Image (cartoon, rainbow, N blue to C red):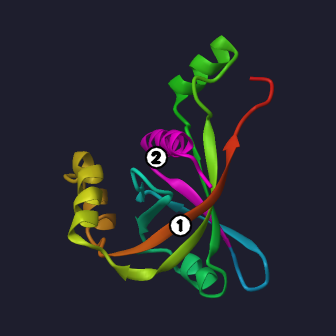
Amino acid sequence: MISDSEWQQIRQIVADAQRAAMHCSIATVNSKGFPSITPIGTVFLNQKTSIGFFFDTYSTTFTENLQHQPLACIQAVNTSKLFWLNALLKGKFKRYPGVRLYAEIGPLRSATSEEIQQVESRIRVLKWTKGSQLIWSNFHHVRDIQIHSYRWVEYPNM
């Protein structure tokens, strides 16, 4: 069970990672056991409980993998140069640099209006760009995430 304080720390690290890298990596396996990693920039975690969702629009291999194995590992790493420079200068991290979430991914479903508002809020700053209009205009389907456990990304010497 993930405690409330751990969950808040996880949420902050995932938010920092998505702000810096613009995505989380979600690892799944195919029917032969080979891993595949999919970058997903629309992971949203619930404020109070260890659940969340993400928009799933373009990921064909990911979808195929989930048909036989719904378990996945979501990795979020803060790649901010300022975060890393500060840690290197001080010899320690202010927070963990990342987290791995071991989760079960739910089936594809229609997004709620609240979920669409959340993604629109996240992409608002870039909405005017051509790339944004091409890749972020068809967000209508999400998958729920149930997080079962986690492991911090850490460097023992720092």
Query: 7 or 11: which is nearer to us?
Result: 7
Amino acid type at mark 1: Gln
At 30% across and 74% down in the image, what residue appears? 111
Q: Secondary structure at mark 1?
A: strand
Residue 155 left/right relative to 55: right
The relative height of residue 92 versus residue 146 in the rendered view (above or below) is above
Instruction: Identify residue for label 1.
Output: 146
Examine the structure image and report whether residue 12 is included in the region drawn in magenta. Answer: yes
Q: Per the image, is 93 magenta? A: no
Find residue 96 and report its horizontal and vertical position in percent: 62, 33
Range drawn in magenta: 1-28
Give the crowd class for mark 2: few <14, some 14-19, many >=20 residues within 10 Å. Answer: many
Can you say which quadrant of the picture contains the N terminus?
bottom right
Kind of residue sitting beneath label 2: Gln
Q: Position of residue 42 (x, y in %)?
A: 41, 59
Numbered mark located on residue 11 in the image: none
User: Residue drawn at (45%, 71%), measured in percent from left and top?
Assistant: 144
Quarter of image, res 115: bottom left
Reading the image, the residue beneath label 2 is 18
Secondary structure beneath label 2: helix
Give the prevailing secondary structure in the magenta stretch: helix
Q: Nearer the viewer, mark 2 or mark 1?
A: 1
**Image position, residue 43 (x, y; %):** 44, 58
Q: Would you say the residues marked 2 and 1 are in contact, meaning their CB atoms lie under 8 Å apart?
A: no
- Considering every residue shown, the one lying at the far top of the view is 90
Left or right, 85 with respect to 128, comes to: right
Taking the spot 58% from the left edge, 29% from the top edge, the residue there is 95
Q: How crowded is the residue under tag 1: few (<14 C-alpha within 10 Å), some, or many (20+)?
A: some
Inter-mark Cα distance, 2 to 1: 19 Å
